[in-house]
Amino acid sequence: MANSFNILANLTKLLTGLFLIAVLAFGSWQSGYATEHVIAAKLKKPFPILLEAAIGSTGYSWATQFDKAWLKLEKSWYEKPESKLLGAPGKQTFLFVPLKPGDTKIEMRLKRPWESSAVKTKVYQITILPE
């Protein structure tokens, strides 16, 4: 009886450990995938996309990909973090101007300029409304 209790207790510990490993693995796997965001913008009225970025010490910054027939990137800028800690994130802002009514998307990829793959991707679905 005591032996079967020990086997059951060990099996419970093993299953609990496997469950925690699966949860942690899934969480880190999910963090690199796109997060869908929806923005309603008015024709010819600039709208911002504001993202956290640790450019200074890590080399990571947000790269944009979008259809230039629908949107114009008016400008982008980086604001340094208030914290002096190494790797503290600042803010990177992108200001887009809608060029014609309809639907398009913006893909933002957090990556180092010399690397081909992104560590994080965000997809913004843009609906451009008439003036």
Image (spheres, rainbow, N blue to C red):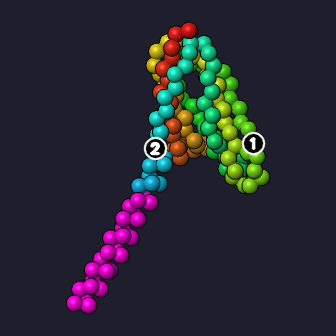
Asked whether residue 3 is drawn in magenta, I would say yes
SS majority, magenta: helix
> In terms of secondary structure, where does tag 1 sit?
loop
Residue 46 quadrant: top right
Name the kind of residue labelled 1 in the image: Lys
Name the kind of residue labelled 2 in the image: Tyr
**Residue occupied by mark 2:** 33
Q: Residue at x 22, y 90 (%)?
A: 1
The span picked out in magenta is 1-25
Q: Residue at x 49, y 29 (%)?
A: 38
User: Residue 89: where, in percent of width, then height?
Assistant: 67, 47
Give the camera-side residue of 40 and 29.
40
Q: Residue at x 56, y 9 (%)?
A: 131
Spatial CA span between label 1 and label 2? 26 Å
Specify whether 17 is left or right of 101: left
Residue 14 quadrant: bottom left
User: Residue 75: where, in percent of width, then height?
Assistant: 68, 25
